[in-house]
Amino acid sequence: MWKDWLTEEAYEKFGEYGYYSMPIELLNKKEVPAGSKVIAYNTQACNTLNWYTWGQREDPGHMFAWLEQELLEIEAQGGLAFLIAHYTPQQCQH
């Protein structure tokens, strides 16, 4: 199901780590600033009922280092970042 919506690179990253980014292409062909991306990051570490992640809270899959790099690149290009996740930042503070 997800594969139809994602680029090959995003699909591979998602399958490996549970997060990805990809350029935004609007179906109505309206434009967004160059360099804009949608970023889906994995906030399952914030799920207090997910016992498996309790021992892996530092930076699972080096996601936060990756996220920081993605945001720096988008900012340098003058783009916009649209972030999507399972949990809000308020729910994800340990």
Image (tube, rainbow, N blue to C red):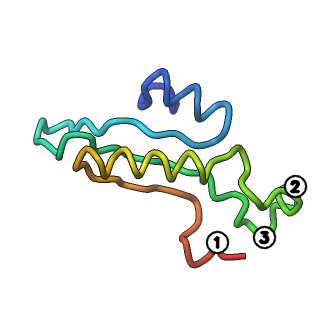
Residue located 62% across and 76% down the image: 91
* Residue position marked by numbered label 3 in the rendering: 48
Please say if the residues under marks 2 and 1 sit with CB atoms less than 8 Å apart.
Answer: no
* Residue position marked by numbered label 1 in the rendering: 92
Give the residue at the far top of this rendering: 8
Q: Is residue 58 left or right of residue 40?
A: right
Give the percent coordinates (x, y) of residue 81: 34, 53
* Residue position marked by numbered label 2 in the rendering: 52
Please say if the residues under marks 3 and 1 sit with CB atoms less than 8 Å apart.
Answer: no
In the image, residue 5 above or below residue 39? above
Give the percent coordinates (x, y) of residue 57: 78, 61
Residue located 20% across and 40% down the image: 34
Q: Which element type, helix, strand or loop, lies under badge 3?
A: loop
**Amino acid at dot 3:** Thr
CA distance separating discs 2 and 1: 16 Å
Q: Is residue 50 left or right of residue 87?
A: right
CA distance separating discs 3 and 1: 9 Å
Sequence-first disc among 3 and 1: 3
Q: 10 Å neighbourhood of mark 2: few (<14), some, or many (≥20)?
A: few
Give the percent coordinates (x, y) of residue 80: 28, 53
- Would you identify the image quadrant in which residue 88 lies? bottom right
Q: 10 Å neighbourhood of mark 1: few (<14), some, or many (≥20)?
A: some
